[in-house]
Amino acid sequence: ARVILQLEKQIGADNLAAVIIEPIQGEGGFIVPADGFLPAIVDWCRENGVVFIADEVQTGFARTGHMFASEIFGIEPDLITTAKGIAGGLPLAAVTGRAEIMDASHSGGLGGTYGGNPIACAAALASIDVFENDGVIERAREIGAILTERLTSIQQSDPRVGDVRGHGAMIAAEFVDPESKAPDAALTAAVAKACIAQGVVVLTCGTYGNVIRFLPPLSIGDDLLNEGLDIVAAALAAA
Ligand SMILES: *Cc1c(COP(=O)(O)O)cnc(C)c1O
């Protein structure tokens, strides 16, 4: 209700072409929206003739244990943006959407220097084939179960670990002051630095810089994943 009030009072539906939102915030700290949040915004957009765009660059392509995170929330965006996982590491990004929107651009009106690069497109087709036939979505869920199990078990014995959250192979852990629960960015940076020194590249995120996000490749094996998590656990214990 607060977001819709802001849209109506600060911008006005008449002035608004589109709402673009990450179904689960990435850089913002892996914030999973409350139940009903996204459907209410989609409904409001539909009622007001505003295009609803889901930025699935980080959440898309099986990352969350669904082909797209929008599925988790039962929403159907008008447009989605995708990149990162779509071409197995080759540089490619895409906008996919309703025909009446996509076809509205004039011939040559949607493009870029590298748009439609044939090698990257071939890699994307091969990736899609793997996603459809090699159980990648299921694997993302298994990775998520391991990450959640290991991180919540660390959380139970270490009060410096705050919230553990996310979906599928997109899981984050917050680091906080054990007493006040205030975000502890210094601890987070120290853990990340110690991990990198041991060869495990972790990324921090979140408004307060106190979140470590886990986005392992969906092709990672259990052994390597657990070895990486062992290093994270040791880095935290030593910090
Ligand atoms: C990485 C990222 C982008 C940027 O995508 P580019 O294809 O590099 O422009 C946009 N949105 C989200 C959520 C991202 O994670």
Image: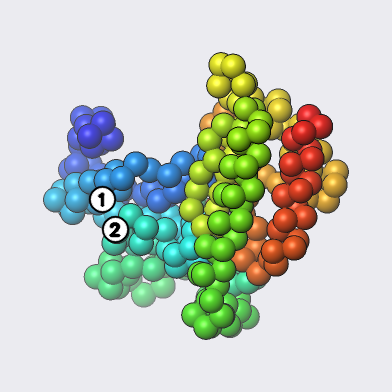
Question: In the rendered image of this protein, does residue 147 appear above or below residue 158?
Answer: below
User: Mark 1 vs mark 2: which is more N-terminal?
Assistant: 1
Q: Element under label 2?
A: loop
- Image location of residue 68, percent across then percent down: 42, 63
Q: Residue at x 53, y 76 (%)?
A: 135
> Which image quadrant for residue 100?
bottom left
The residue at the far left in this view is 47
The residue at the far top in this view is 180
Report the number of numbered marks.
2
How are the residues colored? rainbow
- Image location of residue 87, percent across then percent down: 59, 72
> Which image quadrant for residue 178?
top right
In the image, is 193 to the left or to the right of 69?
Answer: right
Q: Can you identify the residue that label 1 sits on?
A: 39
Q: Element under label 1?
A: helix
In the image, is 55 to the left or to the right of 217?
Answer: left
Question: In the rendered image of this protein, does residue 32 appear above or below residue 96?
Answer: above
Looking at the image, do the residues carrying marks 1 and 2 touch, with CB atoms under 8 Å apart? yes
Question: In the rendered image of this protein, does residue 123 appear above or below residue 163?
Answer: below
Asked if residue 204 shows in the view, the reply is no
Q: Residue at x 45, y 67 (%)?
A: 67
Q: Nearer the viewer, residue 229 or 188?
A: 229
Q: Can you identify the residue that label 2 sits on?
A: 75
Q: Residues within 10 Å of mark 2 (few under 14, many from 20)?
A: some
Q: Alpha carbon of mark 1 to alpha carbon of mark 2: how far? A: 6 Å
Quadrant where the N terminus is found in the figure: top left
